Amino acid sequence: MGTPWETLDESLRAEVAASVQRYAAARPKLQHVAEAMRARISALFEETDAPPLFVVSRVKTVASFRDKASRMLAPEDGEGVPALEFPNPLREIHDLVGVRVIVKLPHEIAEAANLIKRRRSDFDCRSDREKDIGSLESGTYGYSSRHLILKTRGEEIVRDYQAMLSDDVKITGNFVFEVQIRTILSHAWSEIEHDIRFKNAEPRAWSPHIDRQFTATAAMLEAAEDQFSELHERFETVTGFWDTEGEGAVALSAARIQLIWRTLLPHVDRKSDDDWGWAAELVAAHGLKTTRQFAELLQPSVITSVRAALDHRYSPGPDRLLDDVLLWHFGAQHIKATSGGDAHRADSLRRRLAQMDAYRHKLAPKTAAKPEAKPQVKPELPEGSKKG
């Protein structure tokens, strides 16, 4: 088993060698084309909110061009001389120049592809395919990448390259090249995989265990990318809670409180039903009306302090923990606003408030810490509230 060039039919060798010679002579000019296309693609992202990590270009090596130009098609009748897959490789091979756009997260791949494809005045998109579709549908693993085939329009730097190729191509300034868009993790995987699988000087030096390791690594990277994507989405959601002109201004409702709670405190959600009505009543009792005001209540330092102060025998569910957090912030005002004449609830709240005050007092000499600031809202107390 050898390379395509090594196994090329003798009758085709001279033809391929002539193309390789012309490519080698013109390749320095092609490197200028590659850098120009890299700069053009990179410039498209200068005004975007999420630019790629980096944009790089590469020009196919002479050896790689020779191997690709040497690919043969078997005769249709199974006999006779095989034909070349690329009879005119200098015109028909479309990845002589490749530009790679490397992004952080999977959702940025589609955003980058759409941005490039919209620039119809610069490029004509001839093809758009996703490399991982086959893997998804077959249940296997591999690297994920978006491949665009673009064609330039009358570029002078392309004409300089085409002038070096004699009669193999027309001097039009139109040139087809490939853009690959992938995440940084997929990029690392593919680079290592390419070095081991495709640059292997001795194809016989192989082991099935290597294939198994590549598959396992691809699976781990996919899981890591899923986690990074989920983390990014959660961060964007939480950031929105603090936007006073946007999500932070959305009015509170039982459903909204549930969403905020499950986003900020997903580990404290053991409600047996979806009734968050009492939580809405507790919050409304203190005049809290917006998403941002509720997010301010649920700061991690407050949750930690409440847990330490009360030393709950059982991990509290959302209703109880929210009740305690409001008690921590509003103190006696919370007892008055939410006890609703229920002596048992009022006694329980006073006992818990005493524990909180004792905890604050114990910490004060050691840290000289100020108590957490109460949300800056004017309470709007209802006439009564549901009992807890």
Image (tube, rainbow, N blue to C red):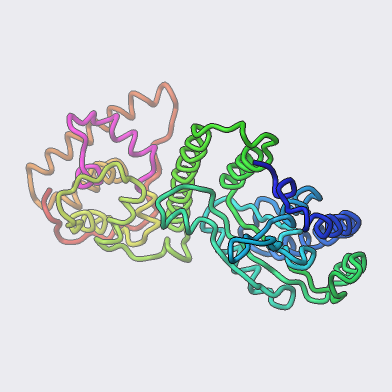
Residue 313 drawn in magenta: yes
What is the magenta segment's predominant secondary structure?
helix
On screen, 359 above or below 327?
A: above
Q: From the viewer's perspective, tell me whether residue 96 is left or right of residue 18.
A: left
Q: Nearer the viewer, residue 86 or 83?
A: 83
Q: Which residues are magenta?
A: 297-322
On screen, 264 above or below 77?
A: above
Farthest front residue in view:
79
Q: Nearer the viewer, residue 298 or 339?
A: 298
One can see residue 178 in this view: no
Residue 24 drawn at (x, y percent)? 87, 54
One can see residue 252 in this view: yes
Q: Nearer the viewer, residue 117 or 308?
A: 117
**Could you tell me how many numbered marks the image carries?**
0
Residue in the picture at 26% in, 61% down: 255
Residue in the picture at 70% in, 36% down: 201
Residue 52 drawn at (x, y percent)? 65, 55
On screen, 264 above or below 116?
A: above
Q: Quadrant of residue 290?
A: bottom left
Q: From the viewer's perspective, tell me whether residue 383 is left or right of residue 161.
A: left
Residue 262 drawn at (x, y percent)? 31, 50
Residue 66 drawn at (x, y percent)? 77, 52
Residue 164 drawn in magenta: no
Q: Quadrant of the N terminus?
A: top right
Q: Quadrant of residue 320?
A: top left
Q: From the viewer's perspective, tell me whether residue 199 is left or right of residue 351.
A: right
Q: Quadrant of residue 127?
A: bottom right
